Image (cartoon, rainbow, N blue to C red):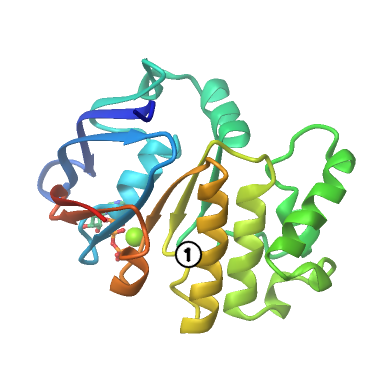
Amino acid sequence: MSKLLYKVNNLTKIFGKDQNCVTALKSVDLEIFEGDFIAITGLSGSGKTTFLNILAGLIPATDGQVLLDNENILNWNDKQLSDYRNLSLGYVMQNFGLINTLNVLNNVLLPIKKNKRKYKNIAIEKLSILKIDSKTKALPYQLSGGQKQRVAIARALINNPKVIFADEPTGALDSENSQNIIDILKQINDNGTTIILVTHEESIARQCKKIIKFHDGKIVDIKIM
Ligand SMILES: Nc1ncnc2c1ncn2[C@@H]1O[C@H](COP(=O)(O)OP(=O)(O)OP(=O)(O)O)[C@@H](O)[C@H]1O
Ligand SMILES: [Mg+2]
């Protein structure tokens, strides 16, 4: 039996106030286990990114719990949340999230707050796994969409995180490059890392271990592959 990693209870997120409010998540319950490789699917606006952002400690929730080792991360203070983000997880953002003024190497080193220099070789190793180590000195604007995505993934790997959240990691890629990214994520998952990725592509979702479908802020289907 795999170990429970996250237990999400009654997770609710409302953006805005009064007439302008949008309920992005409606009482979502979910268990995520160590070693899971989950695809989150659903129409645009169904709450996928919001769900990922809350689990990753990037935005607060309106109601509910996200238990990680029996601690509710929604009660954590800023310092606890930033340690969690920098040390325990990797996050690949929907629009890459690269810093335009930093070169590739320094973008990958961004989550490292202390002794950055010690991590330089690890950063280069991660870039070489993603086959983008020839571009360490390039600035983001000098890269193609697929190359930016690979840098964003290398950055998510820098701390050998327990869990990786990836929001449409293949969204900007052609099918060959998409498959390369999925093959890399599969390898990382085989080594024990839990992966939760958002995708619109059926062919990508089918390669994950579970498919969780969101509709209108709720989970409407869970398929075990
Ligand atoms: N910061 C925000 N302020 C107000 N509303 C927001 C905010 N972020 C998201 N929303 C709303 O919450 C809902 C869910 O958005 P979310 O980004 O989670 O969708 P998504 O499933 O990731 O969509 P996509 O596939 O287009 O990325 C949408 O109706 C969106 O307009
Ligand atoms: Mg999204």
Position of 102 with respect to 196 (left or right) is: right
Q: Quadrant of residue 83?
A: top right
71 and 57: which one is in front?
71
Going by the numbered disc 1, the residue's amino acid type is: Pro
User: Which residue of the protein is positioned furthest toward the top in this rendering?
Assistant: 70
User: Which residue of the protein is positioned furthest toward the front in this rendering?
Assistant: 1
Compared with 18, 126 (above or below) is below
82 and 160: which one is in front?
160
Q: Which residue is mark 1?
A: 169
118 and 180: which one is in front?
180
| Residue at 46% over, 83% down | 175
Compared with 17, 220 (above or below) is below
| Residue at 66% over, 63% down | 151
- Where is the C terminus found, in terms of image quarters? bottom left
Residue 35, image x and y in percent?
44, 40
Crowd class of label 1 (few under 14; some 14 to 19; many from 20; radius 10 Å): many
- Where is the N terminus found, in terms of image quarters? top left
Position of 142 with respect to 217 (left or right) is: right
| Residue at 69% over, 76% down | 141
| Residue at 26% over, 60% down | 41
Residue 118, image x and y in percent?
88, 39
User: Which residue of the protein is positioned furthest toward the right in this rendering?
Assistant: 117
Compared with 15, 113 (above or below) is above
Query: Which type of secondary structure does the marked residue at label 1 adopt?
Result: loop
Quick check: which quadrant has ligand 2?
Answer: bottom left
Residue 173, image x and y in percent?
50, 79
Position of 73 with respect to 136 (left or right) is: left
Residue 116, image x and y in percent?
83, 40
Q: Quadrant of residue 28?
A: top left
Compared with 142, 8 (above or below) is above
